[in-house]
Image (cartoon, rainbow, N blue to C red):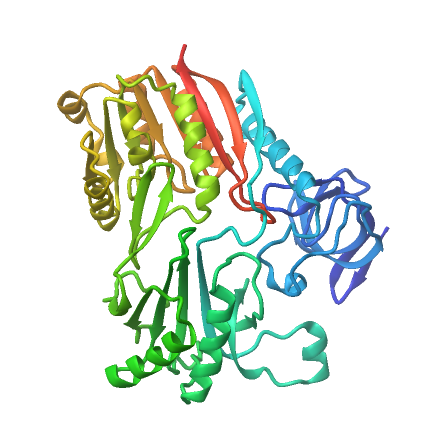
Amino acid sequence: MGRRNKKKIVIEDLEVFELADKGRGIAKDKEGRVVFIERVVPGDIVDVMITKKKSSFLQGFPVQFKKLSDIRIEPMCRHFEHCGGCTLQNIPYNKQLEFKENNVVQVLNRIGKIYPEMVIPILPAPSIDFYRNKLEFSFSNKRWLTKEEMDSGISNVEDVLGFHRAGAFDKILDIEKCHLQGGISNDLRNSIKELSIEFGFSYYDARAQTGVMRNMMVKTSSLGQCMLILSINLHDKEKIESFLQAVIIKNPKLTSVYYCINDKLNDFIMDLDMVLVHGKPYIEETLRDVTFRIGPKSFFQTNPKQAERLFDVVETFAGLSGNENVYDLYTGIGSIALYIAHRCKQVVGIEEVAAAIVDAKENMEQNNITNTVFYAGDVKNILTDSFADQHGKPDVLITDPPRAGMHAKVIEMLLTLAAPKLVYVSCNPGTQARDLALLSEKYIVAKSQAIDMFPHTHHIENVVLLTLK
């Protein structure tokens, strides 16, 4: 039965039976149409306000819970209801894994018509809290308010430091404790908020584009090292460094402190000059027998414990014996390439971001690895017949593309190279399925294994081994 509420349709008594690929619940109305529902758990029975209506599906959010699912648990984080980050925290971890694994298989089947010969059980994360080594926080002079707070007429003018809510570019949810990053992260953030107010620094107003305090990034490592990068809209070196000295005194475990001056209209900082005011210019992380130096602009796997296990899966799928010529596409800072280097003859890495290749080469030298070579540039432009002639045809090809997947020209070249083994690592099973369908011209999917890099979120990595037909 449906009723109208403020010109919007509310569908009553929908029972959620599954989670979709973005963590939304799935139900069906009486006409059999799929309804995607935000912020629900399988087993919930809810009344849903419809916000989008298409011929093949509906989309909405719950306005009333008629019955709560038996699998619901109490979230660990006090910010869960409002943050929007760890959307699966109210579901037991074993159920999260079950939903993610099923979703990967369904996406491969539905989008790519891919049916792996072997689906290996999902690899759980060794830690389900405090597992991230990087977090970014934003400053704002306007706090995000709940509906109840807005209805009460309370003012949202307040200096806050935390996360953006989806769709609220100019408001921030103030965060007291985040369960994603351990070490000194929470104490550091809270002390920076306290000290910046003491120093009289204004917080950024995204609409007026004014204010001093803009963003901060915290990078940590399992070796106990911590890097702070402060983005500040202030052209006063003395004031900035005086403030940061106060931060360092209050947080003596900081091993590296940077700042950058951002007076642009956007929050992107990777194009800005980084000024080191304390400690080493990098922090270090060790994965198995390789130590990586991570600078302020370096990209590194955000869950290092699980990254090591991911790389082990890649290595196992590749079946390295020590004599292989390996290509590593979208290599980043060479994480996988350097990790597997001593188990093969040669690794050739390609990465579009030039700064990442600088990091890869530095880490190669620091670890005395001599059988890797790295190239900066777009994979579709570098990976050519002449490139293969120069470096030899690959025995194993590893590809770990961004969420958009691989360019059609890259897939065409992979089919031309016809490496006996192709290991495809993906953070987006949808685009992976699309690419696998194109590669099926010459390859079969021998193995597939999902790996949970980000507990409590809908995100999932999937590793696939393709072998020639």
- Write down the quadrant of residue 419 in the picture: top left
Q: Position of residue 280 (x, y in %)?
A: 26, 61
The residue nearer to you, when weighing 191 against 6, is: 191
Q: From the viewer's perspective, is 239 left or right of 175?
A: left
The residue nearer to you, when weighing 186 against 122, is: 186
Single out the residue that lies furthest toward the top: 469
Q: Can residue 409 be seen in this view?
A: no
- Write down the quadrant of residue 402 in the picture: top left
Q: Position of residue 378 (x, y in %)?
A: 24, 40
Is 272 situated above or below 18? Answer: below
- Write down the quadrant of residue 15 in the picture: top right
Is 276 situated above or below 132? Answer: below
Q: From the viewer's perspective, is 162 left or right of 290?
A: right
Residue at 47% over, 43% down: 305
Residue at 36% over, 44% down: 286
Q: Is residue 415 visible?
A: yes
Q: From the viewer's perspective, is 329 left or right of 100?
A: left
Q: From the viewer's perspective, is 23 left or right of 311?
A: right
The residue nearer to you, when weighing 92 against 104, is: 92
Residue at 50% over, 58% down: 181
- Label tally: 0
Q: In which quarter of the image is the C terminus?
A: top left
Is 153 situated above or below 415? Answer: below
Residue at 42% over, 79% down: 204
Q: Where is residue 290 in the image (x, y as percent from the top left)?
A: 32, 39
